[in-house]
Image: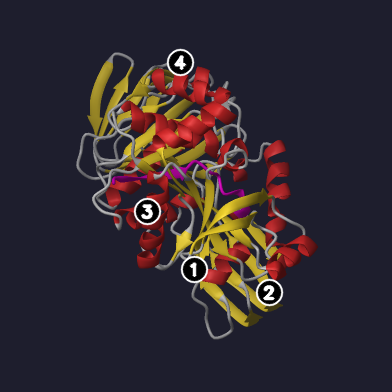
């Protein structure tokens, strides 16, 4: 029996804003004191199942982050499938299952969101192996987490007939996130689990059930995969066909309709880290019951989550609070209101605020850039280009650029010229001039870029050639 982990890494984690942003969401952030992101922890957890080749599904905007983070943990055998837009878990699972079948396999798939925290690795493997046995018998399993409080932030699963003394039940029904009174009822009844969002099933079983209950999703995913584009490290689904696929969860599309659904008790410590108060619950605390990161000075502060990313953060006389400082935003909230941040983020999105899209440092396939100063007619950035990487061959209509090399060696393409620049050397690029910046060296290239012009938006760019497949 071969178990293939399928890691769903396409979310944006808006409830952990302002640390989590659209272009660098929570699953890729190092939220804890260790050296690994949640995504990396999920991949390492999957490795406990043996020498497996995981399938990673992610947003096209994040695939280069996935590549880098896999490289950091020496995982070089993963298949990365990039989604051109989000379509929820049912299509993502379909793509993974269809891909597995396309390779001539029909493996047991373990679907895991990339942003969960699970402490007991041994117990995790034991429960996965039990679920895999049911998958071999064409059942579709979901892990149900033991309910220990009246939580309103999770979906619930009502258990039905007991199938095994190992706490395995038929699924009676799935229910959405409840209000407080309903959550209390579920908690006291003892008949419910929290919905973990982790599934185990054979590729062929899932596709057969999807074709029966949501045939349109199966068809559009098949076409998206059939017309996918393959690069060295990524398979990008056809946007034309994937856009036609309706957005739906596995729960709605399949699990609520099939007669093959079972729920397997997942008794270990689990948290989907969906909010700041959830993060406070699982992290190490000081003597005042605070979780504290960064440079802080606290006086008479208790039961709070305090995180300073860039500046000195001072807090006095508060209890049960969330305070998050980033380079461009400060969040202050009562801990019991942490779940209510999502409507605020949606409002900021409507206002097209950059603070929900990207951090002060914006990551790109070639490296990153950091806005240092910005005004109406000029902008100053610091570019960091990874060794061997290059920006696209491009042109701007409305802005000129002046590049100054701070460290490393830059290879410049400007019009018909190609030349190198060393530290303290510079070049000027006028509007409507094709140009490219490359790093031919073995150390990061750091360049200060000064933009001037009547319009400095990131969308003033015409790409003629790009090694990362961007249009």
Whichever of callouts 3 and 1 sits on the residue coming sooner in the sequence is 3
The 10 Å Cα crowd at callout 4, few under 14, some 14 to 19, many 20 or more, is some
Whichever of callouts 3 and 2 sits on the residue coming sooner in the sequence is 3
Label 4 sits on residue: 432
| Disc on res. 234 | none
Whichever of callouts 4 and 2 sits on the residue coming sooner in the sequence is 2
Whichever of callouts 4 and 1 sits on the residue coming sooner in the sequence is 1
The 10 Å Cα crowd at callout 1, few under 14, some 14 to 19, many 20 or more, is some
* Foreground label between 2 and 1: 1
| Disc on res. 40 | 3
Q: Position of residue 465 (x, y in %)?
A: 35, 18
Q: Secondary structure at mark 4?
A: loop
Q: Between residues 30 and 403, which one lies in front from this camera angle?
A: 30
- Residue 130, quarter of the rendered image: bottom left
| Disc on res. 320 | 2
Q: Secondary structure at mark 1?
A: loop
Residue shown at 50% from the left, 71% from the top: 283
The 10 Å Cα crowd at callout 3, few under 14, some 14 to 19, many 20 or more, is many
Residue at the farthest top position = 416
Could you tell me how many numbered marks the image carries?
4
Left or right, 411 with respect to 172, comes to left
Q: Which residues are magenta?
A: 1-15
| Disc on res. 269 | 1
Residue shown at 56% from the left, 57% from the top: 326
């Amino acid at each position: 029996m071969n178990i293939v982990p399928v890691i769903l890494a396409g979310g944006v984690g808006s409830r952990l804003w302002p640390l989590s942003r659209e272009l660098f969401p929570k699953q890729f952030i190092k939220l804890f004191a260790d050296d690994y992101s949640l995504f990396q922890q999920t991949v390492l957890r999957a490795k406990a199942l043996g020498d497996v080749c995981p399938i990673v599904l992610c947003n096209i905007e994040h695939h280069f982050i996935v590549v880098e983070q896999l490289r950091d943990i020496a995982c070089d055998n993963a298949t990365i499938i990039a989604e051109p837009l989000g379509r929820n878990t049912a299509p993502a699972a379909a793509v993974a299952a269809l891909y597995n079948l396309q390779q001539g396999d029909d493996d047991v798939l373990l679907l895991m969101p990339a942003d969960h925290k699970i402490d007991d690795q041994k117990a995790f493997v034991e429960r996965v192996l039990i679920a895999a046995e049911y998958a071999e018998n064409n059942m579709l399993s979901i892990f149900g987490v033991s309910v220990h409080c009246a939580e309103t932030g999770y979906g619930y699963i009502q258990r039905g007939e007991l199938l095994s003394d190992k706490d395995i039940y038929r699924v009676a029904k799935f229910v959405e996130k409840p209000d407080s009174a309903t959550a209390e009822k579920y908690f006291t009844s003892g008949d419910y689990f929290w919905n973990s969002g982790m599934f185990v099933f054979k590729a062929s079983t899932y596709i057969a059930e999807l074709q029966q209950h949501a045939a349109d999703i199966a068809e559009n995913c098949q076409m998206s995969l059939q017309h996918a584009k393959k690069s060295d490290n990524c398979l990008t689904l056809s946007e034309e066909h994937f856009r036609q696929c309706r957005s739906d969860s596995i729960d709605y599309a399949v699990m609520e309709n099939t007669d093959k659904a079972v729920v397997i008790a997942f008794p270990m410590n689990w948290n989907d880290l969906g909010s700041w108060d959830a993060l406070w619950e699982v992290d190490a605390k000081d003597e005042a019951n605070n979780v504290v990161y960064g440079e802080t000075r606290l006086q008479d502060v208790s039961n709070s989550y305090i995180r300073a990313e860039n500046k000195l953060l001072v807090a006095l006389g508060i209890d049960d609070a969330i305070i998050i400082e980033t380079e461009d935003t400060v969040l202050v909230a009562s801990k019991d209101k942490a779940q209510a941040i999502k409507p605020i983020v949606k409002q900021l999105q409507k206002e097209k605020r950059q603070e929900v899209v990207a951090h002060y440092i914006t990551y790109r396939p070639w490296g990153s850039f950091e806005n240092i100063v910005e005004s109406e007619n000029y902008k100053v950035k610091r570019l960091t280009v990874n060794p061997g990487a290059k920006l696209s061959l491009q042109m701007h209509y409305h802005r000129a650029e002046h590049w100054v090399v701070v460290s490393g060696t830059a290879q410049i393409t400007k019009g018909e010229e190609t030349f190198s620049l060393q530290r303290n050397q510079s070049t000027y690029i006028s509007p409507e001039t094709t140009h490219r910046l490359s790093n031919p060296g073995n150390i990061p290239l750091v360049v200060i870029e000064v933009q001037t012009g009547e319009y400095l938006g990131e969308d003033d760019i015409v790409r003629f050639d790009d090694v990362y497949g961007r249009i």
